[in-house]
Image (cartoon, rainbow, N blue to C red):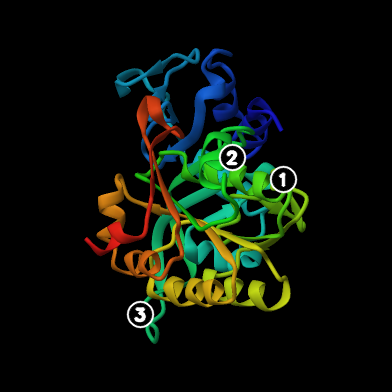
Amino acid sequence: MKQTGRLSQALMLLSPRTQELIKSISEAEKPEINEIRLRRGGKLSVSACGREYYVCPGGRLSLCGDDGAELRDDDIDTAFNRALGGSVHSFRREIAEGYVTAAGGCRVGFCGQAVISPEKGYVTDSVRDISSVNIRIARQIKGCAEQLFSQAYKSGLTGLLIAGPPSSGKTTVLRDLTRLLSEKHRVSLIDERNEIAASVGGRPQNDVGPHTDVFSSYDKYSAIMTAVRVMSPQVIVCDEIGSRKDLEALGYALGSGVCIAATCHAASYEQVCGKKNIKKLIRAGAFGACAVLGTGPLCGKLVSFSLTGAKADA
């Protein structure tokens, strides 16, 4: 699906007046939009090319909010309700976790007043008084992982860790890497936040390859353990690893002879090795290579590639 088509699907979540404001943005700038942000009492904004711009009447984008289009309460309420298909009770888990995946693969994040369980001490199944909605437009850029794929797997399958700071394109690259791996290998995709395959009704909205089995909205631990036991993957793909439970599940997969392709938040290989659980996985041989992505003009671009191993012991 072309990026303009994905933007059109994101617009369907908006109120008529905010739809018209986004539609009025120039055709040259629309393909660069990756997020639409609505804040109660604030002004409509979009994220593009690593920066956030206010949307002004007439479609002009500005870094200064003086002329930005004011949002009304019904703009936020409409986006939230449309993302949930009008059924709050059907999305209790998603509401508690602060996001839902809409048709077309757009991920809608939101925040507000959390309802805390007195017994458990954390958000259970409700967030009320929604204050912000962030519509992240799914981006599939076929071919963006080809350079990384050829470098990492030139000698055969191995573990690969993709690092980068927020908004560096990790998920976009991982999505294309999944597609490329799946052309010849069985892949189990652990799509915890349902933004890689962006499955709707069991059907991936993105092309993740012909031999990919998608575990949508599972927690990583359960999905990895199940994948190894029932899907016989050659590769497990998952986004944003780092917890102790991730370490345990990925260690189990590694011990079962499965290769791992994963991402983590880090701006350099040195920062990667500063993460205790990931460092343990590197020492255990989970990752034969590490790639680091850039931000800004280098968003989604490979800025460094290195073999791991002994360097994790430094």
Q: Looking at the image, is 51 positioned above or below residue 225?
A: above
Instruction: Name the image quarter holding residue 305.
Output: top left
Q: Is residue 303 left or right of residue 36?
A: left
Q: Secondary structure at mark 1?
A: loop
What count of labels does the image hold?
Answer: 3
- How busy is the neighbourhood of tag 1: few (under 14 within 10 Å), some, or many (20 plus)? many
Name the mark on residue 205: 1
View extreme (front): residue: 155
Q: Nearer the viewer, residue 141 or 36?
A: 141
Q: Earlier in the sequence, mark 1 or mark 2?
A: 2
Q: Is residue 259 left or right of residue 246?
A: right
- Measuring 46% from the left and 51% from the top, which residue is drawn there? 110
- Measuring 44% from the left and 32% from the top, which residue is drawn there? 301
In this figure, which residue is indicated by the disc labeled 3?
121
Where residue 153 sits in the image (x, y, percent)?
Answer: 56, 47
Question: Circles 1 and 3: CB distance less than 8 Å?
Answer: no
Q: Is residue 202 left or right of residue 116?
A: right
Instruction: Name the image quarter holding residue 90.
Output: bottom right
Q: Secondary structure at mark 2?
A: loop
Q: Is residue 199 left or right of residue 41?
A: right
